[in-house]
Image: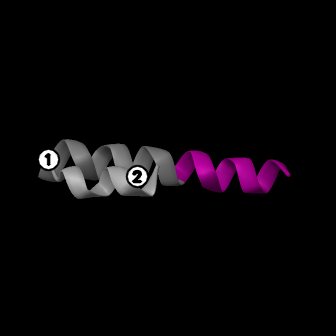
Amino acid sequence: MRLQAKRLNHFVSKTKENKKITGFGGIEKYY
């Protein structure tokens, strides 16, 4: 369970970074 949460957290921060850098709105469909 902890590993899953860690991976999810990593994915979210990665997505946030991508949004910040590219400003690509299409990433939001993953939420």
Q: CA distance from mark 1 to mark 2?
A: 13 Å
Left or right of 14, for residue 9: right
Tell me which segment is drawn in magenta: 1-10
Query: Does the magenta portion include 4?
Result: yes
Residue 12 placement, left or right of 4: left
Please report the residue visible at 43 percent of the width from the left and 57 percent of the height from the top: 30
Residue name at image x 58 percent, y 45 percent: 9
In this view, 12 is above or below 29 = above
For label 1, the crowd category at 10 Å Cα-Cα, with few meaning under 14, some 14 to 19 and many 20 or more, is: few
Q: Secondary structure at mark 1?
A: loop
Residue type pointed to by label 2: Lys
Q: Please name the residue that numbered disc 2 is placed on.
A: 14
Q: Nearer the viewer, mark 1 or mark 2?
A: 1
* Residue marked by disc 1: 23
| Residue 16, x across and y down, in percent | 34, 43
Q: Residue at x 54, y 51 (%)?
A: 10
| Amino acid identity at mark 1 | Gly
